[in-house]
Image: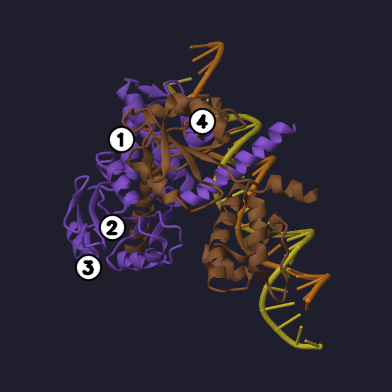
Chain colours: A brown, B purple, C yellow, D orange
Amino acid sequence: MAAQKVARLISERSIGRLSLYRRLLNVLQGEGVRNIYSHQLAAMAGCTAAQVRRDLMAVGYSGSPTHGYEVPRLIESLREFLDAPGGQGVALVGVGNLGKAILSYFTGRRPNLQIAAAFDSDPYKVNRVIHGCRCYSMEHLAEVAEGQGIRLAIITVPAQAAQAVADALVQAGVRGILNFAPVRLRVPDHVHVEDIDMTVSLEKVAYFARQSAERGSRP
Amino acid sequence: MAAQKVARLISERSIGRLSLYRRLLNVLQGEGVRNIYSHQLAAMAGCTAAQVRRDLMAVGYSGSPTHGYEVPRLIESLREFLDAPGGQGVALVGVGNLGKAILSYFTGRRPNLQIAAAFDSDPYKVNRVIHGCRCYSMEHLAEVAEGQGIRLAIITVPAQAAQAVADALVQAGVRGILNFAPVRLRVPDHVHVEDIDMTVSLEKVAYFARQSAERGSRP
DNA sequence: TAGATTGTTAATCGATTAACAATC
DNA sequence: TAGATTGTTAATCGATTAACAATC
């Protein structure tokens, strides 16, 4: 019960790091590593050992002072914590260049988070299968989402169309959206939106690269 | 001189928001809006009015209590603050599905941050022009980067290849990297790395969507 | 055992928020 | 002028870090 509470209060950054740890651990397990210490995981994840320990405490898995964390059991704990019991289907809306790239990117990557259906308003794309994923018309969004139990979506439509798509997704019962369109989406409180804004990210890189260059030239 | 100091101490989040404000302001200017108040910009950017005011103070542009901020002059101030004087060329390494999508995404989007050259190890792609961008062999990285004054790069290669690519980029004088590969890159301190980890983002969405669904069903 | 690592508590840090005088 | 908004300072909040007893 206390663990439940902790689970709810965990920070957004911690969840991101947990997802990262799991991926690193899967690689390590493939290499036959059985045990790992917080500082080793921290070095790989680019964070501190204290953060690793705090994050792992939140998932409810305890390590040992002598052996650190057992890799297979830790992976299992992370799976229980992060994954939905039966897997979660994802809808992708907008099968343009970026949408297609993301379809191919996620194909076979995380079995528990498969893109189950794609949607586009272009009639030429509808009913075609792209990277193993069927493309439906936008009119069938609610129907397909309900039929396949889809509660998550990725938006890769142009900025002007994004809000309308988000509205339709919410209407269709979607609870979480990964948004690549460069717009802030207005959604109800029960819907979680995660933005990936490539232009903003590139401008941040440009700014800080320039700053460090200036710092470097005038120490 | 004081402004210089402020400029250096500005937070990473503020820079991201400034980039967002500028995009919103450009749209507003297109619609003929001349003045804007902090709370209006905040509503569009999904942040608070206090954040907007603090961020804009950092760029050194002052608003008026009666008229708010003048849109054209504010855009100009943001341009001075965020953009490099002569523009910054960007290299894209890894012309797969994602790389091509990003090439098309950034084509003509930000004139000051143009992808000037693409690189790939696949000989079939070398010397071809994709979305208006010439693709070079990885061997010519340093040469082309120097010739075109490129200091920024986007990595869209598979995870296994990312570190080697990052090393080569650093060697070629790159100061900032936008990394789409799901690995933490080890780079010197003077190089700024911004990660876009789509898998982690999607897992975050999945986790928080599930949390809010549970909260919703048991209030 | 000795010693490095763990989980836990207190201190620190930085960003956000609240409060308010100054302004047009 | 009156009033909403600005820039600025102090208070709050949350995450990170440091410190340390417990552990195998």
Callout in the foreground (3, 1) = 3
Check the residue under mark 3 and report the chain it is in.
B
Label 3: few (<14), some (14–19) or many (≥20) C-alpha neighbours in 10 Å: few
* Mark pair 1, 4: CA separation: 47 Å
Q: Position of residue A4 (x, y in %)?
A: 75, 47
Residue drawn at (62%, 73%), measured in percent from left and top?
Answer: A34
Q: Amino acid at mark 2?
A: Arg
**Label for residue A144?**
4
Disc 2 versus disc 4: distance between alpha carbons? 46 Å
Q: Which residue is mark 3?
A: B139
Q: Label 2: state its secondary structure.
A: loop
Residue B76 - label: 1
Q: Is residue B13 left or right of residue B76?
A: right
The residue singled out by tag 2 in the image is B151
The amino acid type, in three-letter code, at marker 1 is Glu
Q: Closer to us: mark 2 or mark 4?
A: 4
In front of the other: label 4 or label 3?
Answer: 4
As displayed, is residue B140 above or below residue A8? below
Residue at mark 4 to residue at mark 3: CA–CA distance: 48 Å
Q: Amino acid at mark 4?
A: Val
Q: Which of the 4 quarters of the picture holds residue A137?
A: top left
